[in-house]
Image (spheres, rainbow, N blue to C red):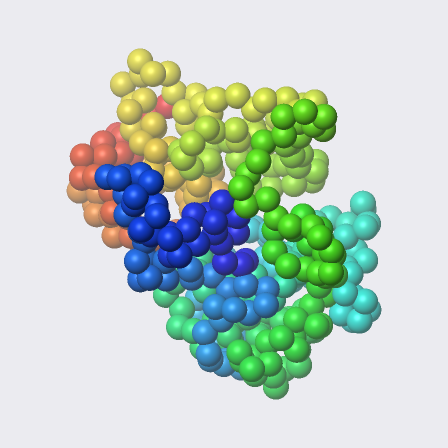
Amino acid sequence: MFRFRDPLTAALITVCLTAPLQAQDKFPGVGRAAVPKEVAAWDIDVRPDFKGLPPGSGSVSAGQDVWEARCASCHGFFGEANSIFTPLVGGTTVEDISTGRVATLKRTDYPGRTSLMKVATVSTLWDYIHRAMPWDKPKSLKVDEVYAVTAFLLNLAHVVPEDFTLSDKNISEVQRKMPNRDGMTTAHALWPGKDFKNSQVKPDVLVKACMNNCGPEPVITSRLPEHARDAHGNLREQNRTVGAQRGVDTTKPEGKLGDAAGPVKLVGSARKDSPHAAAKALTQKHACTACHNMDGKLVGPGFTDIAKKYPGKVDYLQAKIKSGGSGVWGEIPMPALDLPEEDVKVMAAWLAAGAPK
């Protein structure tokens, strides 16, 4: 991660800070210049050169304590779990630490790609844990806990020893030991890198459109390997309802490269005129289907399993939807949800009625 990944955003903020009067004169009555506190609220990430990294430290042993309490339920005690998310650790060697390139990434027969195989910068690892973890309560870890958890993960990958303490003072030294540190190109000119350090290549912060002699327009596609298609249930039903939905039905064989995924169907193929369609639609609207299948366990129990356990208990289900918790269906926690009361009532009534399809 690095500050102002979007060049256009960086350019706009620079304009706001350096020429507020010019902007106001040029576009009177349209907005205002951003004040330093507003810019600081956006500028929260940690760059590969460690700008933005707060002071602190954490040991491998302290990281293990935090890991077992806050992380192991999803990732396993050694970062190896594959039941909820893909493994974090594995696939790297001492030789990779020496060369800076993960040799396993070139093997087509290797069963998967762990996070430590792919990530090139330790700042990315630290920043993601700091801002997005734990899954049920992001940003709840203290700075020293983030250092400790990062140190524990690096120890699992044999990057640092068991008695190591990671800090803002030595993290740059750790970067020189990352297994895939040389596996990422910076030739795109989005941030300063060795590929164009002494060249004339500059990022296009003005987003100039090509008008003639342009190359072919890129088509962005992606494919899942066969062994990973149905590893976590039907991904199409788990997409959060933000923007256009292009999730792939991973219960079916791969189509031709570039095939459009089409619109997302309601859980259980609910028809719009079904009396239960509203409840099913709400489970997608509020991203419940990211953790719950219609039938069978995904991250949490299936809707039909919940319905069988709590028939007719509308009030109880309303309370559980709102408050979350753990221990009833396993150790993986369900976060508390701040949802409209009427939506909660509709979903609870549907579950209490047996989650009919």
In which quadrant is the C terminus drawn? top left
* Residue 265 to residue 66: above or below: above
Q: Nearer the viewer, residue 51 or 85?
A: 51
Q: Position of residue 250 (x, y in %)?
A: 59, 31
Which residue is painted at 40% across and 33% down in the image? 241
Instruction: Please identify the quarter of the rendering in which residue 351 is found.
Output: top left
Q: Position of residue 287 (x, y in %)?
A: 38, 39
Which residue is painted at 49% across and 81% down in the image? 57
Which residue is painted at 68% across and 60% down in the image? 193
Instruction: Please identify the quarter of the rendering in which residue 266 is found.
Output: top left
Q: Position of residue 143 (x, y in %)?
A: 43, 73
Does residue 168 show up? yes
In which quadrant is the N terminus drawn? bottom right
* Residue 347 to residue 91: above or below: above
Q: Nearer the viewer, residue 180 or 135?
A: 180
Which residue is painted at 33% across and 62% down in the image? 36
Q: Nearer the viewer, residue 327 or 90?
A: 90
**Image position of 114 (left or right of 4):** right
**Image position of 354 (left or right of 72):** left
Q: Nearer the viewer, residue 16 or 311?
A: 16
How many badges with numbers are in the image? 0
Does residue 91 show up? no
Q: Position of residue 310 (x, y in %)?
A: 27, 41
Residue reaching furthest to the bottom = 163
* Residue 216 to residue 157: above or below: above
